[in-house]
Image: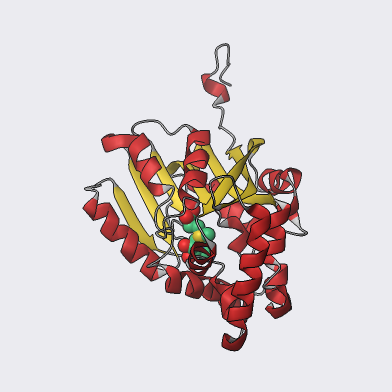
Amino acid sequence: MDPNEAAQRSARVAAVFERVADTYDTVGVPWFTPIAERLVAELSPAPGERALDLGTGRGAALWPLADAVGPTGRVTGLDLAPAMVAATRREATERGLATVSLLVADAADPGLPEASFDLAVASLVLFFMPDPPEALRVWHNLLVPAGRLGLSTFGPRDAAWEQLDDVFTPFLPPQLLDARTSGARGPFVSDAGVEELLAAAGFTSVHTASFEQAVRFVDAEQWRLWSWSHGQRVYWDAVPQEHRGEVLAAGSERLEAARDSYGGFTLTQQVRITVGVRPPTVDRDALPGATTS
Ligand SMILES: C[S@@+](CC[C@H](N)C(=O)[O-])C[C@H]1O[C@@H](n2cnc3c(N)ncnc32)[C@H](O)[C@@H]1O
């Protein structure tokens, strides 16, 4: 992709997250945190390790990483949206986490030293990168040999969720339809597609762990608030003001298909966790029986 076009695309993505930074992951609907916790657990961070959180947002993966690496480790979180970084930095201070540092940086080219992290995660971020294969090559080089990378991306949603999100479809411009993060086509449509991206970037031991994540709303208003509070804000933005009431009414009606036995609404989404390892370097001269010439 042309570098200018890539920069413009990233700037558009960052602008959305800049606007939602204050409400992101704070409307009482657990979603980003449970996904990030599963991702972090999959990499088994150990005390003392150096961890990187690419596209940290409000720190859904950052906090479990900091807990796991402990006071002898360190965690770097970066994000392209300055308001996300500012809010997460404030929270790191409130939590008294001296081991955490936060940067405003583009994950496509973060300007960090090569081979300086034992593990890196990107939770719900790779599909925003203008050139995912190139981003993965950069992330590969930030890891030490035998360092681990973990990504979360979206698999399929249940039928009720598909129908609910379709309330926006008539208003979405083509580029937004294509950018749906569950991926109707391209590498993000399957486990194998994402695994191939990692393998092509040089990762080995690539594998996928998928799980089903539920999201629950007490009522349609909480769904509206939640969808407004994160990246789905772009869908609402695409709906002209005079049509928002009808979209909300259609959403409320479609939520009925997801009514649960506790009087709220439960939707489910497959979440894919893909893990890979930067190949370890083997010092052949140090192997038992090696001869020096
Ligand atoms: C869906 S949010 C996920 C945030 C966090 N990882 C989580 O799980 O809650 C995507 C985040 O990636 C950030 N982002 C998107 N493109 C980026 C880029 N090129 N470089 C750094 N951050 C980026 C956005 O600003 C946003 O905070």
Q: Residue at x 72, y 69 (%)?
A: 178
Q: Is residue 167 visible?
A: yes
Which residue lies at the image location 32% right of the left edge and 63% below the top edge? Answer: 87
Compare residues 28 and 94 and report the one nearer the observer: 28
Q: Residue furthest right?
A: 185
Q: Residue at x 75, y 48 (%)?
A: 190
106 lies above or below 261 = below
Q: Quadrant of the C terminus?
A: top right
Q: x, y (%) of residue 48?
A: 33, 33
Q: Nearer the viewer, residue 54 or 240?
A: 240
Q: Report the colour scheme.
A: secondary structure
Q: Is residue 75 left or right of residue 286?
A: left
Vertical order, 97 against 234 (above or below): above
Horizontal and vertical percent position of residue 144: 48, 39
Q: Nearer the viewer, residue 131 or 86?
A: 86
What percent of the width, then of the height, locates residue 237? 56, 79
Q: Quadrant of the N terminus?
A: bottom right
Q: Residue at x 56, y 86 (%)?
A: 241
